[in-house]
Each structure stands twice: as C-alpha cells, then as structure tokens.
Image (cartoon, helix red, strand yellow):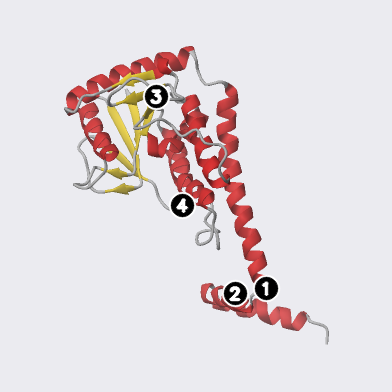
C-alpha cells in the first residue's frame, strides 16, 4: 500500500507527544511490512530507514502577507498554519497516488486537501470532538473545521474504548498495540476497512467540492484582512508610511530612486 502520514515532528524526540511517537512507530512498522510510506511533517529531526519525508515549508500561497503574520484573530492564525500542509500535500499528490492518508486529532484539519482529492482518510482520535457552536468566531471556526473532517473520515482509530460522543460508531476502530510490527499489522487491517468504506460510501461530491472551496476561502479571508489592515495603517500612521517607503528603498534602491524621480517630475509646476 501507498500510505501518507501527516504529523508535526518526525521522527519523535525524547520529549515528543504521544501522537508523534505513534506516527514514528507506525511508519517503521509499515516499512518493515513492505509498504510505501510518505510522511508529511512540520519539523524533521532525522531520517528513518525506508520512510520518504517531506517537510512542510513556510510557503503557503500567501507570501505577500505584510501585517497578518503579526496581527490576526486566532482563527486566521490557525488557518494560516494549515495552509502549508494543504499546499505541500497538493504538491506531493501530483506525483504520487496514495491509498490512504492518516493523521491524528490535533492535525485533523490537515486532511482537508486529501478529502478534496478523494483520498480515503483515517483519523487517530484522543478524545471526543468538541461540539460547541455558541462561542465567538475563533472557537466556532475551529470546531466546525474539525467536524467537517470527522464527517468525511473513513475510519477513526482509538487506543482504547469504543464509544465517543458525536462520532459514527460504525467507523470506530481499536488499535491498542504498542509493538511497531503489531501496531502496523492492526493498522493495515483498519486501512483495508477504510478503503472498503470509502468505495462503498465515498464522501459525497458536496464534501469534496466544499473542501476545495474552503481552502480558497481561507486564503481569500487572510489576504483581505491583511490588505485592509495595511491600507488603514498606511493612511493613519506617518511612522507606518515611513517604514513602508524605507522597506521599498531597502529592497530595491535603484528602482525606488527612479520611481520617486518620475513622480516628482510628473507633478504639475
């Protein structure tokens, strides 16, 4: 099988969380079993034999952001953190076809791109999903994105206990194994079940189309916020204007001088 695992740190460090340790042990076991494993991570600590690791870069499709990187609502900060995962998955999936994609609950929203591409997805759960919709926009946005992914997941994996609030019981699978070989063997059984469910009850086109629209909406939302804030600051703060022209000058002094001269000459006498 061709398997993509999405995590934050890979391989796990001595002080890494349980999710990172789980991904490291699982990937090792899957490689030993003869399967093709690709790991998408934010931080690469070292190499693991047989595992192809792709590091998520800072590039997110919004390289021109000027203010949003420093001043943004929490919802936009979290959405911007997801964009590099989404773009990185798109890039690697252009050249590789995956049978299944898995991540853990904390990074559930990184599966949006896999859902948009129609890949079977598996989610490692640690607790019942939040079901809050009465909070502010920041909290509601995060909860709704998580619920979106849960609605599209083909299997949920638990380390123990078979009941979770707000989760479809038919798709709940238990994997209590700790040895890497046994862990991978059990997980492969779960993948097989996820593939069958995906083929039989594949996510409606509404979900896949919605995933693509969500990515574009997030990028548009962040860009609009950034442009609006920059425009306002430019008009009300002389210090900000000085900083703006100084950055322009530092980035390209020669071009800046030519443009400034042309503006002066073009003014009516």
Q: Relative to residue 137, is residue 165 depicted above or below?
A: above
Q: Earlier in the sequence, mark 1 or mark 4?
A: 4
Q: Mark 3 points at which residue?
A: 164
Q: Is mark 3 on a helix, strand or loop?
A: loop
Q: Quadrant of residue 27?
A: top left
Looking at the rendered structure, which numbered label has been put on residue 240?
2
> Which part of the image, by quadrant, shows the N terminus?
top left
Residue shown at 29%/28% (left/top)?
36
Residue 169 placed where, x, y %?
41, 17
Q: In the rendering, at what x and y percent does residue 126 appear?
A: 34, 32
Mark 3–mark 4 distance (CA, rounded to whole Å):
36 Å
Up the image or down, 201 lies above or below 158; here it is: above
Quadrant of the image for the C terminus?
bottom right
The label number, if any, that marks residue 236 in the structure image: 1
Tell me which numbered mark, 2 or 4, is placed earlier along the sequence: 4
Residue 59, numbered label: 4
Which callout, 2 or 4, points to the residue nearer the camera? 2
> Which circle's residue, 1 or 3, is located before the other in the chain?
3
Cα separation, mark 1 vs mark 3, equals: 52 Å
Nearer the camera: disc 3 or disc 4: 3
Which of the two marks, 2 or 1, is nearer to us in this view? Answer: 1
């Amino acid at each position: 099988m061709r398997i993509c695992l999405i995590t934050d740190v890979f391989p796990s460090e001595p002080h890494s969380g349980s999710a990172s340790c789980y991904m490291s042990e699982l990937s090792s076991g899957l490689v030993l079993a003869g399967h093709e494993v690709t790991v998408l991570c934010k931080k690469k600590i070292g190499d693991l034999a047989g595992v192809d690791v792709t590091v998520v870069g800072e590039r997110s499709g919004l390289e021109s952001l000027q203010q949003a990187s420093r001043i943004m609502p929490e919802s936009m900060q979290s959405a911007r953190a997801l964009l590099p995962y989404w773009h990185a998955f798109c890039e690697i999936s252009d050249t590789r076809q995956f049978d299944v994609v898995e991540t853990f609950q904390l990074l559930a929203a990184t599966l949006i791109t896999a859902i948009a591409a129609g890949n079977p997805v598996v989610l490692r759960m640690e607790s019942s999903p939040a079901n809050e919709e009465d909070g502010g926009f920041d909290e509601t946005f995060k909860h709704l994105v998580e619920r979106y992914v849960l609605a599209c997941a083909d299997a949920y994996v638990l380390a123990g206990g078979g009941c979770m609030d707000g989760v479809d019981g038919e798709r709940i699978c238990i994997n209590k194994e700790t040895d890497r070989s046994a862990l991978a063997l059990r997980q492969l059984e779960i993948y097989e079940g996820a593939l069958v469910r995906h083929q039989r009850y594949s996510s409606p086109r509404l979900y896949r189309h919605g995933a693509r629209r969500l990515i574009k909406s997030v990028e548009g939302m962040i860009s609009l916020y950034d442009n609006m804030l920059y425009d306002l600051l430019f008009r009300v703060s002389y210090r900000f204007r000085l900083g703006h022209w100084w950055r322009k000058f530092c980035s390209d002094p020669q071009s800046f001088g030519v443009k400034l001269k042309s503006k002066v000459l073009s003014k009516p006498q």
